[in-house]
Image (cartoon, rainbow, N blue to C red):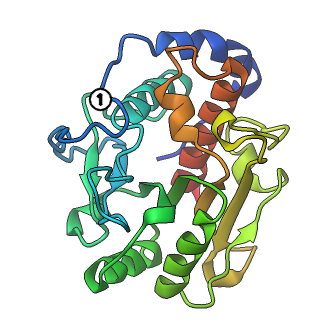
Amino acid sequence: MRVRRAWWLALAVCMPALTIAAQGFRGGRRGSPGREPNPNVPYDGRFTFVRVKFEPLGGGWDLKWDHDYPRAENHFMKILEELTTVKPYLEGSNILGFDDPALFRYPIAYVSEPGFWSMNEKEMAGLQAYVQKGGFIIFDDFAGQHWFNFERRWQEAFPGLTPVRLDKSHPIFDSFFRIESLDMDHPNYRGIKAEFWGAYEDNDPTKRLVMIANYNNDIGDYMEWSDEGFLPISLTNEAYKLAVNYIVYAMTH
């Protein structure tokens, strides 16, 4: 499935209106103890948002991986449908572990809070196979010292496959929207600037990017609250642009 880039300049102007258009979706709030996720949706070939679940380090009722669920994905799927030729599944999303064979039906997986990410042997094997077969992973919503757990888990699964910092010249930032600046400053992170990290197949920059990590950033948060006015509209729009680019890049590489 390929996606046209033709109208990116005009669409960038329209983003504030499209952000408002996402109103009407409502879902559970972050960290609601005892909140059950919605049932997974059946596979029918449409692009479906997949969130990866894991046993969070430290335990407790805060699952970490469900932060911003399901409002972030609900809002984003509507934006993706409005802006691109992708025909996403709008009636729901899926939550799967890396050890679930069903994951191989879906080319892109989203991991929230990798600062608390853990894996057992089956999950690690599933992650390795998923990436080797062409899967793309988006890591989001972590900052500061949480980097060290993310890096440790990644290196456990892919020894020697080293994350590198990306700048705006990378094709992922020009796959649909042309991202002019990566200067993002999430209010929760008290002035710490966002960084974008990725890993290449075989550590070769001429090959495909297999994952991207939004470090010191939380695009899921921007998308979840895009209809509430809690976060700056300008940054919310940039988060949507990044998310659209990630999908288009992964689907075309």
> In the image, is 83 to the left or to the right of 184?
left
Q: Residue at x 32, y 41 (%)?
A: 46
- Please give the name of the residue rendered at 38% of the width and 52% of the height, measured from the top-left corner: 64
User: In the structure shown, which secondary structural element does the residue marked by tag 1 occupy?
Assistant: loop
State the residue in front, 115 or 140: 115
Q: Is residue 168 left or right of residue 41?
A: right
Type of amino acid under label 1: Gly
Provide residue 170's location: percent of width, then percent of height: 78, 56
Residue 146, percent across and down? 58, 64
Left or right: where does residue 95 sit relative to residue 12?
left
- Depicted 225 relative to depicted 17: above or below: below
Residue 151 locus on image (x, y percent): 59, 75
Q: Which residue is mark 1?
A: 28
Q: Is residue 175 left or right of residue 57?
A: right
Farthest residue toward the bottom?
159
Q: Is residue 209 visible?
A: no
Pinpoint residue 162: horizontal percent, then vertical percent. 67, 81
- Quadrant in which the C terminus is drawn: bottom right
Instruction: Tell me what residue is drawn at x 49 percent, y 10 percent.
Output: 21
- Quarter where residue 120 is shown: bottom left
Q: Nearer the viewer, residue 87 or 148?
A: 148
For label 1, the crowd category at 10 Å Cα-Cα, with few meaning under 14, some 14 to 19 and many 20 or more, is some
